[in-house]
Image (tube, coloured by chain):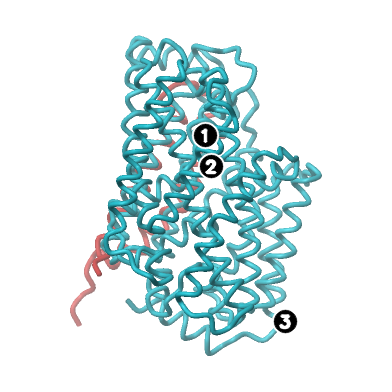
Chain colours: A red, B cyan
Amino acid sequence: MPEKPTRDRLTPWLLSSIPVVMILMFAVPYTLLREVNAWYGSFLFWSVGTVVVIGINVVLTREWKD
Amino acid sequence: MTSEWVWTGVAIYVVLALVMAVLSRAGASQSMSGYFLGSRKMGGFVSAMSYSATTYSAFMMIGLAGLTYAGGVGALGFELLYLCGVTLVLIFGPRFWRVGKKYGFVTPSEMLGHRYASKSAGAVIALASCIFLIPYAAVQLAGVGYLLSGMTNGAISFTAGTVLAVVLALVFALVAGLRSVAWTDSLQAVVMILGASLVVVVVIWQLGGLDMFFDRLAEDPGALTVPGEGYFTFSTFLGLTLPWIFFSISNPQVSQRLFTPGSMREMRKMLLGFLVIGFIYTLVSVFWGFTARLEFPDLASSDMATPTLLGSDLVPTPLAIIVMVGVLAACVSTIDSIMLTLSSMVTRDVYTAARTGAGERGQLLVGKLVLPVIAVLAYWFAHLELDLIAVLSVSASAGLLVMVPPIIGAFFWRRGTAAGVISSVVIAGSLVLWLEATSTVWLGQGSGIWGLLVAVTIFVGVSLATSAPNRRAADFIDASRSG
């Protein structure tokens, strides 16, 4: 049996990492970043979290053809 | 701002949009799916632009900027979590698309009616969507009336603004259905993204650059943290965010778009294009709110943040006009999509459920006749200024959330039944309305949270107690998976 392509094995991991990122987007600003009143606090955290989620969407839709 | 400038801007927009609408007629067909779904052949770019224009109403630029003005960076977190929620399209997009193609569904409620083997279930969902979405469209309309009259100091009256918006929405919807709506949406989205981003660049440059901008914000206590000065408590944040995370599947005017792309490749372009545009839109609106917070700290109402910024010396007049016309167009693009979706739902799920055997041409005629009725209703509601309208509009996102369990169940739970769908939508939907109408807050949580919990409980409980359409469920779920 040929081994499954790496991307197939990655798919469930990538898909389940999205809710994890989103839960962190709820939790971290209200705990660790609660006192950081600067651009590198919640502002950056939420922006980076969103870019990560968009990136995962790019990877997971590569196979969408016809 | 003089009214001549404003009217010139509006006139240029109307002419351009009409040209696009008429050009989009080429290839328009006489079937329901041709009119309401662009013959299921929509391209990715136009779909992405149109999806953005439909989602981001005039209130994104006003409401989100206002929320930032009042509560600081929490507004960014709320809107970006919504955007991340659009990831649901990864799971539901291909499934909607496959079953839409196989069974010929035109509306999401028709899909649910088929899946649960009950036209009544489809009709209940269609009617519930009308109850929440017509007032939502009406409030959009009223908003644009206030904005135009506010920015021109009354030179354009409230009535003139709302009449203009409703007539344009109706014309764009009638010319060629989804095709003309999508093309005019695209024009609006491109103009708005460019104009609105340019405003940010110009304003930040005038305020001394990005470093200076953030340094000043850092001196404003709570501007860059949650809960900030106390506005964004965790409950408030959760209550706002949760209904919006499911927006992409709960709101029919956007979930219907999952039937429209010509191929999965085009759907990919739609999804990724929307995510990128949404990210830019969100940052832009939040920057506007922050700017108003720094420069105009004593506004009477936070909703004045955007109009004040655009009317100020910080923004050159021609740019302000472009963005203001963009806000008008954003309102039109949200309303015409809602009108089109509701009209297709009334025709497909209520009219044909009551009159079996109605042909495609007959249905399409009814659909086109329903469009002006919805437009007039929205216009009439906008002028009523009833408290109930405001309540219905505010509860729209929370109210539509109660449809999420039947939608998820359709694809992933064979035991779901029509009785479960109807009872959960009616009871949980009424609960949301009652909580909002009486301003009741249970345990400090928003109405959407209770609506969703009750909807899940009733849907699962009643479904388990009634018999499921096993054969239909198996066929449907198989069709949604095989691509």
Q: Residues within 10 Å of mark 1 (few under 14, many from 20)?
A: many
Q: Which chain is disc 2 placed on?
A: A
Task: Give the residue drawn at x 54%, y 48%.
Answer: B244
The amino acid on which the numbered mark 1 sits, given as a three-letter code, is Pro
Viewer-proximal residue, B370 or B449? B370
Decide: is B118 above or below B87.
below
Task: Give the residue drawn at x 50%, y 59%.
Answer: B341
Viewer-proximal residue, A7 or B20? B20
Q: Position of residue A20 (x, y in %)?
A: 46, 51
Q: Residues within 10 Å of mark 2 (few under 14, many from 20)?
A: some
Task: Give the residue drawn at x 60%, y 12%.
Answer: B298
Task: Give the residue drawn at x 56%, y 61%.
Answer: B370
Cβ atoms under marks 2 and 1 closer than 8 Å:
yes
Viewer-proximal residue, A24 or B1? B1
Q: CA distance from mark 2 to mark 3?
A: 36 Å
The amino acid on which the numbered mark 2 sits, given as a three-letter code, is Phe
- Residue extending farthest left: A2
Q: Residues within 10 Å of mark 3 (few under 14, many from 20)?
A: few
Q: Is residue A56 visible?
A: no
Which residue is the site of mark 1?
A: A29
